[in-house]
Structure formats: C-alpha cells, structure tokens
Amino acid sequence: MVEQQDLKYAVVGKFSHGMPSIAFLRTAIPKQCSLKAEVNIGLLHNRHVLIRCSIEEDYVTLMSRPNFWIKENSKSFLMRTFKWDIGFTPEEETSMAVIWLSFPNLPPNFYVPSILFSIASAVGRPIAIDAAT
C-alpha cells in the first residue's frame, strides 16, 4: 500500500480527447511542463495519469496552470491538472479547484509566510505564495 506521504505532491493529469502512450508521457511531461526534479508518472485510467512530484516547486508548477498542451510530433493533447485526492474516481469530475487569493490593503507586517498561510487556510489548503509577495 502506498502511504499518503508518498502522495503529498501528487497531481492527476486528465486527457479528454486522446492521449500519447505512457512511455512518451514519462519523458514529455517533465520537459514540456518545465519540471525541475524527478517525477514518477503512472497510468491511473485510460484518460488519467498520476504524476508524483518529488519537490514542492514542481507540484506548484503543475497546480498553478489549469492545463498544459503535450505535443507529440504534429499532434497536441490537452492535459488538465488537478490535485490527487484519496476519493479520486475517474468517472467523476473533481469538485476541487485552485484559486488565487488577494489580500488588498493588507498591512506589510502581515507579509510573513506563516501569517499569510494562516489567513488563506480559512478557505482551503494554501500551496504557495506569489514570488512578488
């Protein structure tokens, strides 16, 4: 059994209109999605792959964009990404979404990661702070 910790940075990639072979995806996703470290990519279902990132930065990269175009020769395949969840079912669309929070007029003394994460946790689990913050 895979421990939950191994899936801390797990992302599901969903292909709605065909997909390349899993062998191709294992080399293409890291390159075409600009991932920096090793990832483990496996087939979950005929349209879904599980991408297990080894570093948080790659997880944030995959979660920060709603989709990626994976190119194989002259074809392009749309891959949508979403957070893997223990209740994942390939037949159902996920009800989770990534959102971008803004805190206008927040005093500068609150621009501390632990404070920002604490405030953001009121609406969900924060994954990253914008580099400009």
Image: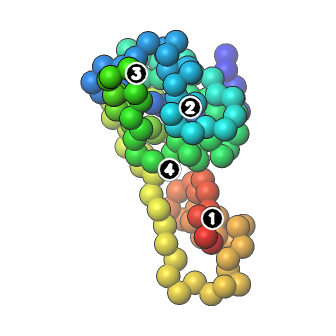
According to the picture, the residue beneath numbered tag 3 turns out to be: 72
- Marks 1 and 4, how far apart at CA: 13 Å
According to the picture, the residue beneath numbered tag 2 turns out to be: 31
Pick whichever of labels 3 and 1 is earlier in the sequence. 3
Pick whichever of labels 4 and 2 is earlier in the sequence. 2
Q: Residue at x 61, y 70 (%)?
A: 132
At mark 3, the secondary structure is strand
Amino acid identity at mark 4? Ser
According to the picture, the residue beneath numbered tag 1 turns out to be: 131
- Marks 4 and 2, how far apart at CA: 17 Å
Return the residue nearer the eye: 12 or 79. Answer: 79
Q: Residues within 10 Å of mark 3 (few under 14, many from 20)?
A: some
Q: Determine whether, in the image, residue 90 is placed left or right of residue 9.
A: left
In the image, residue 103 sits, relative to residue 54, either above or below, namely below
Q: Residue at x 64, y 28 (%)?
A: 39
Can you name the residue that lies furthest to the front here? Answer: 74
According to the picture, the residue beneath numbered tag 4 turns out to be: 64
Amino acid identity at mark 1? Ala
Return the residue nearer the eye: 121 or 107. Answer: 107
Q: Determine whether, in the image, residue 110 is placed left or right of residue 125.
A: right
- Marks 4 and 3, how far apart at CA: 23 Å
In the image, residue 86 sits, relative to residue 27, either above or below, namely below
Q: Which mark is residue 87?
A: none
Front label number (2 vs 1): 2
Front label number (3 vs 1): 3
Question: Can residue 14 be seen here?
Answer: no
Return the residue nearer the eye: 92 or 132. Answer: 132
